[in-house]
Every structure is written in structure tokens, then in C-alpha cells.
Image (cartoon, rainbow, N blue to C red):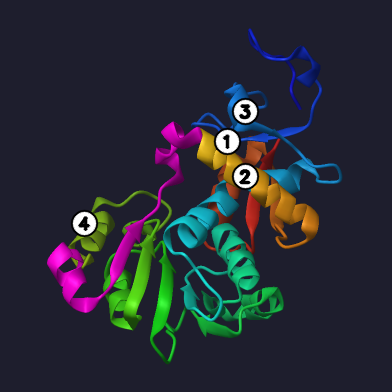
Amino acid sequence: MIDAVGEGVDSSRIGQDVLAMTRFGGYSSAVCAPAGAVVPRPAGMSAQIGAAIPVNYLTAWMMLRVMGRVEAGDRVMIHSAAGGVGLASIDLCRAAGAEMWGSASPGKHAFIQERGVQHPLDSRADQWPDQKVDLILDAIGGASWGRGLDQLRAGGRLVCFGLSSGSSGDRPSKWAQLQAAMAIPWLRTTPVALINNNQGVLGVNMGHLWDEGDRVTAWLATLLTWWEDGRIKPHVHAAVPFAEAAEAHRILHRRENIGKVVLVP
């Protein structure tokens, strides 16, 4: 809810339920955001569901609609398919009519199948599709990116949006980060190699799109319309109080969640 507005902003917006992206500093009961980056929260949408949309669904939108250009009939592999970005990606792929392979632990397979994944893969057994695919969404990085390049057919795109293989245990590990960096297929992602293999490697980081605010806000407005139409269904795994933020990070780090983990005052 808007508590106050700055100079030049319509004061009638005070009291309005809204959504907004923040440039860090989001672990707070009150934040300041540019007026143009703040959009009304639709009637009937709870604050928790609203919080599950911006980062997750905008990341999926950037990967699939803006860069990956997913189309009906495309074969798509989604790593961490039961996570917040994974479920958002499933929604967008389903809307496009794509065929999906979703990687997750076996206990999450029934859920992602209900959401639209036709081919669940066991992430613990390092399962991959039994055929070449058009698009791979991969936040694991390291050796997984090399395996992904092997899995692409001509015209395929590998979308990289994280490097979770550089994290080991509950604390930062420089050794794990070094191992992940050494496993990145650097030579296979040069322009010449990509030309010869008819492949694309794309990178997505929503945190570096602050100069594209108008575009991002327009995507968010579209996503909210899709929520009203029932085309996307954000899922909140847990709402964790601010005072227990460490527990929220533990849930994410150990991959216990299905969908979004939200912090609440």
C-alpha cells in the first residue's frame, strides 16, 4: 500500500494497493520506488501472491518471451522447475503451447505435472531429456551449461540466469566458485563456436535492467492481466516473518520449496 508520494505524484494514489520492483533494500516494511515502476495490485490479489509475481515472472518473461522467443511446439527444458522462476516458466511455456521437460526432485514431480510439465526429470539422478530440445533455462551453471549445449538441436538456445553450482553448503565457498568457473564451457560459447553449431547462449539478470524501467513495468502490467485471466498461477510455498529471514534462506538453499518463499512483516 502507498503510504506517501513524492513531489509531482498524484496524491490520490495514497492508500492504493500496489506492486513494485526494488533495487535491493526489499527486506523492509517500507520502501521508496519510482512512481513509474509502481503498478496497481489487481482486486482480489493478496499481497503474498503479488509478491510472488515481479521477480519470478519477470525473469521468466525475459527468458521466454523477450530472449528465448518460445513458440508452440518448442521443446523446453526447465531446471529447478518447482522453484519460483521454474513455476513461472512453466506457466509461460504452457501459455505458448510448448512441450516441457522439468527437472526437480521426485517428491515435486506430481506438482509440476499438474502445472503442465509433460516430462518430469529427476534432478537428483541428473536426468536429462531423451531428445534434443530448442530451449534450456539453466541457473545451475558450470558443467551444466556444457551439458546443455550438447542437448540443444540446431537453432537451440541456452538461457543462463544463475550460477548455483558455485554455492556449496550453508556458507560461501571460494573453492566451489572456482570449480564452477573452471567448468564453464568458455571455448564452446565463443561467437565462432556458436556460428558453427547454430546455437545461441543468452544471459538474463533482472537486477541489471533498471535503465529499462518502462519496458519492465509494461511486462509486469501484462502479467497482471494474465493473472486476472487465469493464465498464470503464482504459488507461495511459505510466508516467513522478517525476524526469521534466515529460515527463508535455508528453505531456498536446501531446495525445499515449491514456488515462492515470501517475507512478511
Between disc 4 and disc 3, whose residue precedes? Answer: 3
Residue appearing at x 74%, y 49% in the figure: 49
Among all residues in the image, which is located at the extreme top? 7
The image's mark for residue 28 is 3
The image's mark for residue 220 is 2
Residue 169: x %, y % from top left: 40, 58
- Real-space Cα separation, disc 2 to disc 4, in angstroms: 36 Å
Residue position for label 4: 178
Q: Are marks 4 and 1 in contact (CB under 8 Å)?
A: no
- Real-space Cα separation, disc 1 to disc 2, in angstroms: 10 Å
Q: Secondary structure at mark 4?
A: helix
Between disc 1 and disc 2, whose residue precedes? Answer: 1
The image's mark for residue 180 is none
Residue position for label 1: 21
Magenta residues, start to end: 187-213
Q: In the rendered structure, which amino acid carries the disc numbered 2?
A: Leu
Of labels 1 and 2, the one closer to you? 2
